[in-house]
Every structure is written in C-alpha cells, then in structure tokens.
Amino acid sequence: MPGDLIPSSQSNNKFSNTSVVFRCSGCGIYNLSSMGRITNNLNQVKFGPTQGPPVNSTCHFCRSKIHMAGPMYSGPLHNKEFVSAMLKFVQDNKTKFQTSKRMEGMLTVIFEEIDAPLFYLPNDLSSTVRSPTPDYQTLASAFLNLGFKVSFSHCAAGSLKTDAPPEVIWDVMRCWAKKNPVKLEKFPKGAPGLLILGVEPSREVDFTYNPQSNTPSRCIKLVRYQLNPEKNWGPKPRHRRQVEECRSEKKQKKELS
Ligand SMILES: [Zn+2]
C-alpha cells in the first residue's frame, strides 16, 4: 500500500543489519548497536527497535570520550558458497590470470574470515598499553583458548578479527603486559593505557599455541594482500630539477614582462 509506514520484513532485515559504531577516542575499542532487533518467538519472527546505546558517553576502560560513527552495514559479509566456487575456479585456471597466486590467497582469507563487522590492529592494542606487539599466532591462540573465534580481515594485512567483547580484549592485553612487563612510570598521568593496566584482569589468559591459529592461508604461505608488482612500482616524487627549472622559467618571464 503506497505511503504505508510499516516496513516490509525485507527492509526490517536490512534495518537489523545496519549499525552505528561507538568508538573510544582513547583506547580505540568499539561497540556496535544495530538499528533494529530481531526476536524469534515460537517460530514467529518479530522486528523491533534496538534498546541502547550500548555505552556511556565516556569509555568504561579509559574514561576517554566516545565518538559515534555510521550507520554502516554490519550483517554477514561473504557468501561462503560463492567464495568457495571462485576459489576452485582460480585454482583450476591458474594460467588464465597473472595474479592468480594473490587471488587464491585473498579468496582463502575471505573464506576463513569470521562474521565480525570490524577488526583490530594488534599494533594499536599494544601501543595503548605500551607493550611489545604479540605476533598473530600468540594473540589468536589467547582468544581461541578462551573460546572465542578469530581470523584475519581481508581489508588489512596484520589485522585481527574476533567475536570477543571489549572487556576480553583488554583482559588479554593486561595479561600480555604482565608477561612482558611495561614501565608504568613512563605513562603520562591519566593515559588510557595506564587506566586499563590499573585494573586486574578478571580472567586467566593462556597464550599457549592453539593449532586453530594456524589457518590454511598461513600454512601454505599464500600471497594474501596487494603487493607492489615490481621494484619501484607506484607514484614517484616529482622531479626536483624539473620543478626548479620551471620556477626559474616563471621568474624570468615575470622579470621580462
Ligand atoms: Zn577507551
């Protein structure tokens, strides 16, 4: 019916797969809040508004301000069946593509990717608590040993996706900082990392190697992300001499006029 204000189930579904992001300006941790909520009661699917927001205006961990961004798509990212068929096609037709190795690598990463909408960079987490950066396998093993999922993101090399909530992420980094002691006296007063490390972890974290952290894309050492195709590839800086010549030419013209 034209002008009907009640959205169809399809648009309700889209609404539930759209979220706003609440990201801490200090420690970088984020929470998502979907625009709609789906409940399944006695095989009857119901759509409703989300209750929220999921965070206060300041961060629970480091007391910094929370910024809101979005809306963004937060539903399932990849059709695994389609990705699997693409992967098989590339493997069966390697000679057809110049970049077949990277295509195979990227498709394998996408196939392994978990359905978490955003990712973290381990380097960012460790720089907040000023500890050495754990390698991917160590960090992934910690989350896997706690019962959470992990994967890379196809968007960035060295990224880590997990379904672990923010409190677990900081507990992992607190335990990592205990294993690799950091100098608390070097933190400025009120620094996000100091406030995070000032709280004892509420769970024990086991960093022992978990075989699931060694995914097929790592095992077969695939080229996964975009690399420069050859040496010195890409935009180069402007030639200095040429710029200087151009400048002096302009100067001469000005003087003559
Ligand atoms: Zn924070």
Image: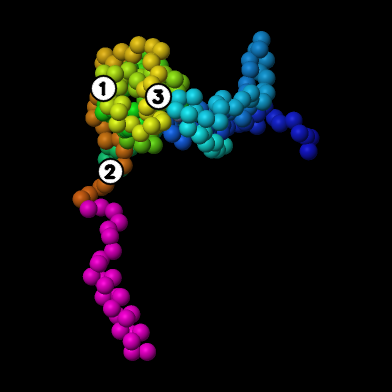
| Amino acid of disc 3 | Ile
Residue on which disc 2 sits: 227
Kind of residue at disc 2: Leu
First reached walking from the N terminus: tag 1 or tag 2: 1
Q: Residues within 10 Å of mark 3 (few under 14, many from 20)?
A: many
- Residue bounds of the magenta highlight: 232-257
Q: Is residue 173 above or below residue 254?
A: above
Q: Is mark 3 within 8 Å of ligand 1?
A: yes
Mark in front: 2 vs 3: 3
* 174 horizontally vs 167: left or right: left
Q: Quadrant of ligand 1?
A: top left
Q: Residue at x 30, y 28 (%)?
A: 185
The N terminus: image quadrant: top right
Image quadrant in which you'd find residue 88 = top left
Image: 242 above or below 39? below
Q: Main secondary structure of the magenta part?
A: helix
Q: Which residue is mark 3?
A: 196
Return the x and y of residue 222 as percentages of the image width and height.
26, 32
Residue 181, labelled with which disc?
1
Q: Quadrant of the C terminus?
A: bottom left
Q: Secondary structure at mark 1?
A: loop
Residue 137 in view (yes/no): no
Q: Residue at x 56, y 31 (%)?
A: 57
Amino acid beneath label 1: Pro
